[in-house]
Amino acid sequence: MHHRIALIPGDGIGPEVIAQAVRVVDALAKDGGFTVAWTTLDVGADRYLRDGATLPDEAFAFLRDESDAVLLGALGDPRVPSNVHARDILLGLRFRLDLYVNFRPVKLLDARFCPLKDKTPDDVDMVVFRENTEGLYTGIGGQFKRDTDDEVAIEAELNTRKGVERIIRAAFEYARAHGRGSVCMSDKSNAMRHGHDLWQRVFKIVAAEYPEIKSFHLFVDVLTMEMVRAPERFEVIVTNNLFGDIVTDLGAQIQGGIGLAASANVHPGKHALFEPVHGSAPELAGKGVANPLAAILTAGWMLEHLGHADCNARIHAAVTQALAAGDVTRELGGTLGTVEVADRVLARLV
Ligand code: IPM
Ligand code: MN
């Protein structure tokens, strides 16, 4: 088996953590009987500052036609205060490749890193399916009488029947395929009576096709309370783009912090882009201290997507052992640098 993987190392700490993820994947490929061809794309802040290009056509065509997956570090650079390159690349790929599933696992690997009292890895083990192509992220809207006292700004929330149905279905399909017992849909239909009423109706219709899976609904404000009070209630959560953005940052914290949070942007059967949830942390860049574990865990999900679920399990086991041993960077209470943490994970890949 051969995989073509496009790399967008990104800005700040992105290239440092992605290099470690690449080492882990290469090690697994070697004894897993598959090969990986990496192609690094010249996009990111440096490229933008050089010639103004964010996601040029040839890069987009390469990602669309000549790669099996994309691995992205993080985007964001103080030299580009508008962050236009990050928006064009990350949001651009989500929309242009129609990556409608934003898959964000929230799994606590070691109780010591959980900020919630008395919660164990069994309690914090859920997956969020965030809708990734509509909602409040489309830029539909406008400004009127800008910079006057009468200014009006409208940001429209787009919810299509097709878009809502496919993300809800993806959540149920995942639950069925992975033996998860429930799916919770979260919206704000008590206040947003048009778009979120559509979510209510479609959720009931799709849920009826999966009678073996318990389905329930929480308003998003209640969901945030419940994720903190009783995370064990949740196995699969499905929600819209903005709510998913917010609850997955909450999820990142209850699983041990943003340094451990992985994510995937997927159009099932077509394209997939994998990225750690964390940002480019420019203040840490170049110092060799960034935590590579989120990038490594993200690479695990990429391998699972490419048909190597065994490799993802091995990565998760190795990272869990490294956490238990305290082989971590400073923000998790350790003393190791980026490369050393990856070394300790590599040494535990059995
Ligand atoms: C994320 C990020 C992005 C989002 C930003 C950078 C636009 O926060 O991937 O969660 O809101 O989707
Ligand atoms: Mn976010």
Image (tube, rainbow, N blue to C red):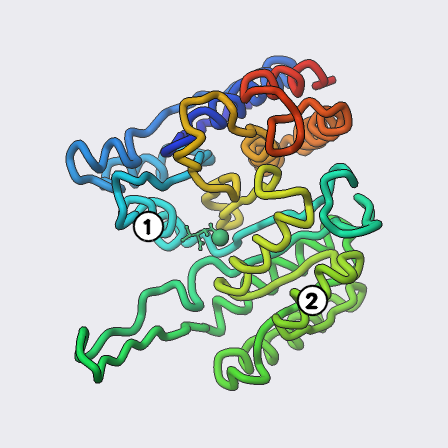
Q: Using the image as rendered, state which of residue 311 and residue 317 is in the foreground.
A: 317
Q: Residues within 10 Å of mark 2 (few under 14, many from 20)?
A: few
Q: Residue at x 76, y 37 (%)?
A: 110
Q: Is residue 209 above or below residue 75?
A: below
Q: Residue at x 67, y 67 (%)?
A: 223
Q: Position of residue 74 (x, y in %)?
A: 42, 38
Q: Amino acid at mark 2?
A: Met
Q: Which mark is residue 87?
A: 1
Q: Using the image as rendered, state which of residue 303 and residue 82 is in the foreground.
A: 82
Q: Quadrant of the C terminus?
A: top right
On screen, residue 138 versus residue 48, left or right, reads right
Q: Residue at x 20, y 39 (%)?
A: 53
Q: Is residue 120 above or below residue 152?
A: above
Going from the N terminus, do you reach mark 1 or mark 2 first?
Answer: 1
Q: Residue at x 50, y 42 (%)?
A: 278
State whether label 2 is within 8 Å of ligand 2.
no
Q: Amino acid at mark 1?
A: Arg
Question: In the rendered image, which quarter is residue 263 located in?
Answer: top right
Question: Under tag 1, what secondary structure?
Answer: helix
On screen, residue 205 versus residue 277, left or right, reads right
Q: Using the image as rendered, state which of residue 221 and residue 61 is in the foreground.
A: 221
Q: Estimate the spatial distance between the alpha carbons at disc 1 and disc 2, rounded to whole Å.
A: 30 Å
Q: Quadrant of the N terminus?
A: top right
Q: Position of residue 349 (x, y in %)?
A: 70, 19
Q: Position of residue 233 (x, y in %)?
A: 79, 61
Q: Is residue 251 above or below residue 262?
A: below
Q: Position of residue 315 (x, y in %)?
A: 67, 28
Q: Nearer the viewer, mark 1 or mark 2?
A: 2
Q: Which mark is residue 225?
A: 2
